[in-house]
Amino acid sequence: MKINNLNDFITSPDISGYESPIRMIVGEMETKMEADTMYVIQHYGIDVDKDELIKALQYDRDQYNKGYRNGYEAGYDRAKEEVLKQWGMIPE
């Protein structure tokens, strides 16, 4: 199993086929958000081009993922520096 980030580790089923409950909760949340979005669009009579909506949602997801990756990498780098300081491998 190749793990690219913490999210892959949490949501990927292991070799035995066990699926983390976190993955199920995340899937349920995404489904609920999609249903809520559709409800608002229909309830208020918003005219939405399906393809444009999908593009906008994908862009939003990509921006979120980019921010998550940047934050994760910054945190990883900071943690690595702290560990190296504790081991005396770099000056303070």
Image (spheres, helix red, strand yellow):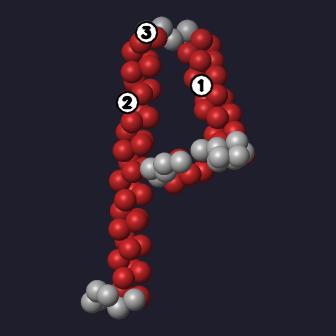
- Residue 43 on image: x %, y %: 62, 13
* Amino acid type assigned to the residue bearing label 1 in the image: Glu
Vertical placement of residue 39 versus 13, above or below: above
Residue at label 1?
Answer: 34
Vertical placement of residue 77 versus 19, above or below: below
Residue 85 lies left or right of residue 46; in this view the side is: left
Residue 50 shows which numbered tag?
none
- Residue 39 on image: x %, y %: 63, 18
Marks counted in the figure total 3
Between 51 and 46, which is closer to the camera in this rendering?
51
Identify which residue is drawn at 27% across, 89% down.
Answer: 91
Q: CA distance from mark 2 to mark 1?
A: 15 Å
Residue at label 3?
Answer: 49
Q: Residues within 10 Å of mark 3 (few under 14, many from 20)?
A: few
Sooner in the amino-acid sequence: mark 3 or mark 2: 3
Identify which residue is drawn at 35% across, 68% down.
Answer: 77
Residue at label 2?
Answer: 59
Snapshot quadrant of residue 36: top right
Identify which residue is drawn at 44% across, 26% down.
Answer: 57
- Residue 30 on image: x %, y %: 61, 32
Residue 28 lies left or right of residue 68; in this view the side is: right
* Amino acid type assigned to the residue bearing label 3 in the image: Asp
